[in-house]
Image (cartoon, rainbow, N blue to C red):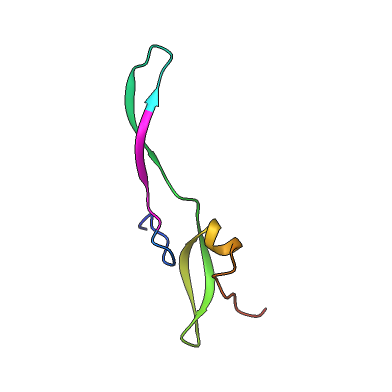
Amino acid sequence: MSKKCDICGKKPLVGNHISHAHNLNKRRFNPNLQRVKVIRNGRVEKINACTRCIRAGLVEKPPK
């Protein structure tokens, strides 16, 4: 599963862990992705959506 939002295209960023002695180690900041069911082109499919897109209402969820 790719770590990319299917709606906005948000993907991991790269940064550093910084210790108290200021030693640097590479790290990744992953987006908070959720697997949700959405209606696309009249069909229900599962996509990876970041929580920012879900809260903003960009995801049209199917009726229960």
**Image quarter in which the C terminus is found:** bottom right
Count up the numbered dots: 0
Quarter holding residue 29: top left
Residue situated furthest top in the rendering: 21
Residue at image coords 54%, 70%: 58
Judged from this view, the residue extending furthest toward the bottom is: 42
Asked whether residue 4 is drawn in magenta, I would say no
Q: Is residue 28 above or below residue 4?
A: above
Residue 3 as seen in the image, left or right of residue 52: left
Q: Residue at x 44, y 67 (%)?
A: 7
Q: Is residue 6 above or below residue 2?
A: below
- Say whether residue 57 is left or right of residue 50: right
Which x, y percent locates residue 42? 50, 88
Say if 26 sits above or below 42 in the image: above
Task: Find the residue positioned furthest to the front.
Answer: 56
Q: Nearer the viewer, residue 19 or 64?
A: 19
Percent from the top left, x then y, of residue 45?
48, 76
- Name the residue located 39 percent from the left edge and 11 percent from the top edge: 21
Give the percent coordinates (x, y) of residue 25.
Answer: 32, 26
Q: Quadrant of the N terminus?
A: bottom left
Residue 30 image position (x, y, % from top left): 42, 46
Q: Residue at x 53, y 62 (%)?
A: 53
Question: Start and end of the magenta stretch?
Answer: 10-16
